[in-house]
Amino acid sequence: MSPRARSVTIVDVAAEAGVSKSAVSRALAGQGEVSPEVRERVEAAALKLGYVVNSMAQGLRTRTRILGAVLRDMTRPYYGVLATALEQQAEERDYRLITVVGGAELTPASAVRALRTLVSLRVDGIVLSSAQLSVEELVPVVARVPLTSVGRRESVEGASFISADDAGAGADLAAHLMALGHRRIAVLGVDASYSLSQNLRTVAMAEAVRGAGGEARWYPVPSDRDVRAQVAHIVGERWATAIMCPTDEAAVGALEELHRAGLEVPRDLSVTGLDAQSPLATPLLGLTTFRQPVPEMGRAAIDDLVERLEGGALPREQVLRGELVVGRTTGPPSLAE
Amino acid sequence: MSPRARSVTIVDVAAEAGVSKSAVSRALAGQGEVSPEVRERVEAAALKLGYVVNSMAQGLRTRTRILGAVLRDMTRPYYGVLATALEQQAEERDYRLITVVGGAELTPASAVRALRTLVSLRVDGIVLSSAQLSVEELVPVVARVPLTSVGRRESVEGASFISADDAGAGADLAAHLMALGHRRIAVLGVDASYSLSQNLRTVAMAEAVRGAGGEARWYPVPSDRDVRAQVAHIVGERWATAIMCPTDEAAVGALEELHRAGLEVPRDLSVTGLDAQSPLATPLLGLTTFRQPVPEMGRAAIDDLVERLEGGALPREQVLRGELVVGRTTGPPSLAE
DNA sequence: CTGTTAGCGCTTTCAG
DNA sequence: CTGAAAGCGCTAACAG
C-alpha cells in the first residue's frame, strides 16, 4: 500500500504560492477580497498540491454548508426517492448533504445514534425522516441545530415538518372503491408503533368507508411486509369485496396470496396499494395506488432548512397532497354472492 | 424560533464536574484511565448538559471512526440494499457511516464532488460505488484515505475492490436459456459508458450464447431504463426466441412491451433479468433473474476497510458470486415457426 | 491518577 | 490589500 500522504494544508498552499495563510484562506473562501494576482497564484498552487479544505478545521470556526439527513430503511423505494430529492435540492442551493441511515428497522435508539453522529459533525441543519422519537429525545438537538422532520408530525417546538397527507390519501382510495360500488371493505391495519404514517392511512381508509355508508373491517398486520396470513384469513371469510393495503409492497404481498388462492383480481376481489414510488407501481402490475409527493417533500424540506438558515425564516408546517393512480387491480365488486 | 443554544463543550462539562478538561476527555473517550469516581461525575455532568462530542474538533487531532460512502442513484434498489448492508456492518464494527449520494446520474463531476465532501470531512475510510472515475481523479484521494471500490474494478494502486461476478452472472443466465433449447437470443446491450457492470453482463451473455453454439444478436439500449423501443423492434423482427436484459428493471420494461404487443411470456418469448434486489423480484412477477450478492459485497467492503485501518491489511480484490433464480418468464422456445 | 500545555487547520480581527 | 496572531474544541504528551 502506498504510504498515506500527510494531508496538504492551507500552509502548504501558502508556501507554494508565496503568500501568507490568511491570504490563501481569503482567496479560496472568497470572503475579504484579494488581488486577482494573488488569487490566481493561490488557486494554481491549491490545484497543483491537490488541496482539499479540511471541513473539520473549517467547521471549528464557521458554518460548513453541510446538511445532514437521517433516513430510515433505504431498502424501501420511498427513502431512495427522498434521498435523491434531498440531494438534488441541496446541490441546487449550494449545500452538501450527508445522510446517515438507520438500520433496516429505525429504532429510536438507532435514530438517536444517527442524530448524534450528525450533531457531532456540526452540520448546519438536519432533515429527519420518520423517526419514532420522543420530544425529550428531540429537544436537545432542536435546541442546537435547525431540524426539519419529513413524513411525521413532530410536536417539538422549533422544528419544521413536511408531511404527505396520509389521511387524505387513504380517504381518496376509499372513495374510489366506494364509487366502484364496494360496500364491504377489508383494511389491513398497521399499528402506530410500527409506522405512524401507515397507521394514519389505514385508519383514514376505514373511517372514509364508514363515513360514506360502507362497512370496513380492520385486520391488523404486524407490518406492511407481513400481510400474507391476514390476506389468507380474509379470503377464507368470504366477506370483503376489496382489500385496502397500507403500502404498495403490502398490496403486492396481497396479490401474491390471492394468486396462490386461485382468485382473480379485480374480478373476485379488488386491491389497493399506496405510495407509487417503487418500481412496483409498474404498468405491468397495474396497481391501483396513490402517488405520494415524495420528491416534492424532499425539496420542501431542504428549502425550509435553507430559508431558516439564511433568511431567518420561522419553522413551519407543510402538508403536501399526492394523487390517485387508478390501475387494473380495482373494479366493480363481484356479483356472485 | 427558540434561540439556538451555544453548543456545550468539554470545558462546560469539566466545570460542571469540577475537574479539568483533560479528565473529561479521558473519561469520555476512555483512553488514559480515570478514577471511577471522576468518570461517574463526568458522565453525569455530560448527560445533564446534553454534551455531544464535536467530531470536528476531535477529528483535528485523531481518527473519528467515521467511514464515508459514495453511492449512486438511491432510487435503485441495488444501492438501497448496499447502503443498508454497509451501515449494518459499520455499526457492527463500531464505526459510524455517512453516505453522500450522487444525483440520479452519477456523473464523474458529481462523484468527484461527493468524494471531496468526504475527504474534506476527513473520514477514516471511503467506500466508492460504481463511479466512473479516471485514475487521475482517484489517485489523489487514494493517496489520502483508504478506499474500497464496490461493483467496479478500479485500476488504482492502493485501492481495494469488491465486485460481483457480472460476467459469470450473464453467462449463467445464457446457459440457462441454452439448456431450455433457445438458439436465437436477443441481448439488450448496454454501453460501458453508461454502466460498466451492465456492459460486462450483457457482453458475457452474448459471448456465452455464442460459445455454446447459439446465435446472439446485440440490440444496444441507451440504458436499462429505456428498452421499450428496442423490444418493440425485436418483436417486429420475429427472430429471437428469448430476450436477455441487463437488469430486472429492464426486464420489466420488456415484459410490459411484450404484454402491450399481445405476446405471452414465456410461451411466445422468454425473458431474463438480472439483480434480484428489487421488489420486482417478487414471486408475483416470477422473473427469471440472477441474484447478485449485494449485502455480502457491502459487508466485505466495510470489513476490508476496517482491516486495513486497524490491522494494516493490504488492499485486495474480491469477486463475489451470486446465484441463478429461475422464475416463470423463461421456458422452452416456441415451436411455432 | 490528574492538571497544564501545546497544537491540529482554519477563519477572523487587527495592524500595517 | 496583506500578514501576524488569536482561538474554535479537542487530545496527547508531559509533569506533578
Image (cartoon, coloured by chain):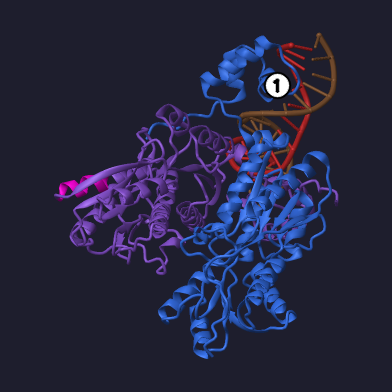
Chain colours: A purple, B blue, C red, D brown
Q: Main secondary structure of the magenta part?
A: helix
Residue at image coords 40%, 29%: A135
Any magenta on residue A211?
yes
Residue B281 appears in the figure: yes
**Residue on which disc 1 sits:** B26
Assess whether residue A49 is covered by the magenta stretch: no
Please state the horizontal and vertical placement of residue A211, each as a whole percent of the image. Answer: 16, 47
Q: Quadrant of residue C12?
A: top right
Q: Residue B71: x percent and y percent?
A: 60, 56
Relative to B225, say whether B21 is above or below.
Answer: above
In the image, A51 versus B68, the foreground residue is: B68
Residue in view at x 33 percent, y 63 percent: A265
Q: Nearer the viewer, residue A113 or B49?
A: A113
Residue B34 image point, x, y percent = 72, 15
Part of the protein shown in magenta: A204-212
Q: Quadrant of the N terminus of chain B?
A: top left
Q: Is residue B126 above or below residue B238?
A: above
For residue A264, side relative to residue B275 (left or right): left
Q: Residues within 10 Å of mark 1 (few under 14, many from 20)?
A: some
Q: Please name the residue shown 21% across and 48% down the image.
A: A208
Assign a secondary structure to mark 1.
helix
Please report, as a chain letter, where disc 1 is located: B
* Left or right: residue B279 compared with residue B291: left
Instruction: Determine the residue positioned at 77% across, 59% down.
Output: B139
- Tell me which amino acid carries mark 1: Arg
